[in-house]
Structures are given as C-alpha cells and as structure tokens.
Amino acid sequence: MLPDMGSPLGDFIRAKRDSIQPEALGLPERGRRRSPGLRRQDLAARAGVSVEYLTRIEQGRDRNPSPPVVHAIADALSLDVPERAHLRYLAKISGGECAGHTRPEPPPRQVRPALLETLRLLEPGVAVVANRLGDVLAHTDGFAAVMADSGLLEAAEPNLTRYVFTDPRAREFFADWDAVADEQAFDLWLGPTVANSEWLSSELAPVAGPEFTRRLNLHQVPARGPLRLAHPQAGPLAFDREVLETADGSQQLVVFLPADEATEQALAQLSRGRDRDRDRARVRTLRAV
C-alpha cells in the first residue's frame, strides 16, 4: 500500500501544531514526549473534531474540510490574521472549500422605490434599510447624523457586521458591544440566501478571528434589548428598534425610536447641527459660484 502523500494544508497544520507548546494554550504539561509541540488529541479537542478526522486532514487523506472546520482549527491553533488567510488558501488549493465552484457572490444592494419613499417619509427620524448580513442599503439623514462619527458610513458599501468585528471604533461606539456582536453573528444564519451568508462568513473569519467564529457557532438567539450608543458628540443614546421585514424577507426596514427623553433631546440637537452644516455648505457653494 502506498503511503499517504500529505497535502499543503495538512503539512501546515502539523507544522503549527509541532511549534506550539501546550502551556502557551493553558494546557497542562504532560511530561516528556516523543515529538514536540501540541498533541493531536489536544488540537482535536480544542477544534471540536475527532482525532481520526484531524489525522486524515494532516495526512492528506481528507482534502475537503468544510469552512467551519477550517475556521475551528484556526481558532484552536490561535492563528493570527496572516496565518488564517494562509490556512484558507491551503484549504482551497488542497481541494477544499473553494475548489470546483464559483465563489458565492454578495446579495444585491438595490432597494425598491417604495422602501426609499418610506425612508423619505420617516425623515428626520432614524431609520435604515438593511439585510441580515448587515449591509446598509439606504438610510435617512437622521441615521447619518447618529452614525456620522462612528466610522460605519465611511465605507463605500457600509456593512454593520464587518464594522462591528473589524473596526476598533465599534467597541467604543456600541456601549454593549458583546450583545451587538452576538446579534450580527446570529443574523448571518438568516441571510438572504445560504450562499450570501457563506460569502460574508468566509470574508470575515480570517480577519475577525475567534470573536466572530465562536459567536457564529453558538446558535444562541440574542435577546435584542435597547441599542445603547456612546456617541462622541451627543453622549449616551438609547434606542428601541422596530424591525419591518420586506415581503421576500431579503431586506429589513429598521426604525430607531428614542428610548428615553435624554436621547430624544440629543437627537434634536444632532439634527439642528446637521442643518447648520448643510446651510454652511450651501453658502460656500454659492460663494464659489
């Protein structure tokens, strides 16, 4: 019988396992060993897979681990962002998650005219049209006023889930960051399509790391209490959220309602400040002409 030829993916996992001392991961020292590093059974336990399955991957006998397994192994090895990207690339060339099919595409960003008109009628309220992946598809000026200093709307195609897990400003802006992160990860399971959810999950997992993948696999329904913001200008804000689903379930209209009088007053000040900025911009334009 011919010996297993291995694979780049298996070789990398084995090399990383051999380079890790159990103590670095909080595991007990097990005395002298024939080989250095982390034992295969310890890595399998941390990744939530069987020793037999991990052995097949390392030996190249299983070249098609699923994306969740690849992400779980990355978490178990405590890989950094470049190492995670490399692990996914090796899974691809070894015949894994991306081989043999077209990469899933993000969902369409078009918003129906009726929804856009609804947003217009909600001005100067705080409202947004989004999907379960966190794509910000359209919003009121009131929403822009609240989010202006957060960094969320700086992206060409803003996405709340990506912002929460990859932008350090999100941890300061959201007073209950952990709860918001739980919501965004859970909602990926409810995305417009399975392919859309897989697309964003595969995009985020290498850069967001365990904070994302752990939450993604919890399958715990979030409580969705009031949304509390630590606004850099207006101070603490609190909103109740009213969520209206579109007929096909692919998009949502989310209306943010002030949860207390202080928030209502702060919103009025933000709205007045935005009107003043518009007036100044209009004057500058007229003078330039």
Image: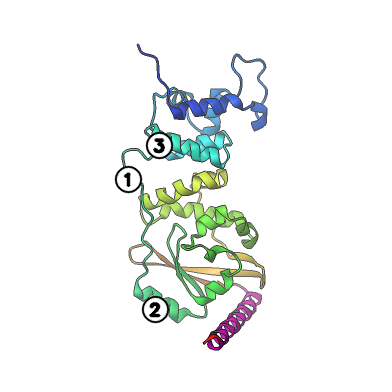
Q: CA distance from mark 2 to mark 3?
A: 44 Å
The three-letter amino acid code for the residue at tag 2 is Glu
Q: Which residue is mark 1?
A: 102
Disc 3 residue crowd, few under 14, some 14–19, many 20+, Cα 10 Å:
some
Color scheme of the displayed model: rainbow
Element type at marker 3?
A: helix
Q: Which residue is mark 2?
A: 117
Q: Which residues are magenta?
A: 260-287
Element type at marker 1?
A: loop
Pointer 2 or 1: first along the chain: 1
Q: CA distance from mark 1 to mark 3?
A: 12 Å
The three-letter amino acid code for the residue at tag 3 is Lys
Q: Which residue is mark 3?
A: 92
Using residue 88 as the reference point, say whether residue 173 is left or right of it: right
Dominant secondary structure (helix, strand or loop) of the stretch shown in magenta: helix
Q: CB under 8 Å between callouts 2 and 3?
A: no
Where is residue 126 drawn, in percent x and y? 52, 74
Where is residue 154 drawn, in percent x and y? 54, 65
Quarter of the image with the N terminus is top left
Task: Give the number of the disc on residue 271.
Answer: none
Q: CA distance from mark 2 to mark 1?
A: 36 Å
Q: Which is in the foreground here, disc 2 or disc 1?
A: 1
Determine if residue 26 is in view. Answer: no
Disc 2 residue crowd, few under 14, some 14–19, many 20+, Cα 10 Å:
few
